Amino acid sequence: MPSNKTELAARIAVTRPNDGVRGLFFREVFELIEKTGGPHALRQVRTGPLAKDIHDLRTYPAADYLTMLYTAADALEHKLGPEDAVFNACGRACVQRFSHGPGQVVFGILGKGDPQRLFAQTRVAFSTVVTYGKRDHNPIAPKACILAYRGDMQPPAYHVGIFEGALVALGFKGTVTARPLSIDSVDYEITWE
């Protein structure tokens, strides 16, 4: 089933011209697409503005990132399942960049092996890779928190993948539940053991 283009249009409609995402996240998703779906799937996604060279530290339009995610869902649904499964895989791929190799140093500094500490740094961490939205951390128990995302138009399943991937990288089992309030406002309840 093709990805929901009506939802994509609604998400793009709430972006502002200066809303951007660092190129390294585009490149991580491109790698996932090629690894999972092969060169044909990557060619299917890398069209229009996405066909140009993408550089890790440059910022590119959030609308292009959304388009990439939804096109990736179309290209990978036969391998990964419905769009939410693809969005989740894309989020996990992006967090892996910071949980392995040189990025592990940053991940270790922010989290120090403690999910609560890591998630408390969400505002700072995301401000280095995107130019939009507000993120607040609210601990609700020693092993639980709510991350309130406002002004962030990415699909909830994408962020669920990021948070699930972060828990795995720290060696924890947990659950992440998205509670959408509007197209660009979601509360994520995260618990771990």
Image: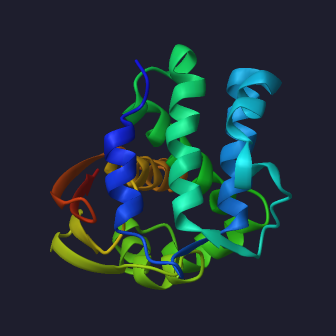
* Coloring scheme used: rainbow
Residue at 86% over, 58% down = 53
Residue name at image x 44 percent, y 72 percent? 118
User: Residue at point 72% right, 48% down?
Assistant: 48
Decide: is 174 above or below 14.
above
Residue 78 visible to an observer of this rendering: yes
Q: In this view, does 92 lie to the left or right of 38?
A: left
Q: Which of 148 and 170 is in front in this view?
A: 148
When asked about the image quadrant of residue 11, the answer is bottom left
Q: Is any atom of residue 153 visible in this view?
A: no
Task: Name above or below for residue 8 compared with residue 32.
Answer: below
Residue 53 lies left or right of residue 6; in this view the side is: right
* Of residues 1 and 166, the one drawn nearer to the viewer in this rendering: 1
x and y, in percent, of residue 16 in the image: 44, 77
- Give coordinates of residue 182: x percent, y percent: 17, 61
Name the residue furthest top.
78
| Residue at image coords 33%, 71% | 116
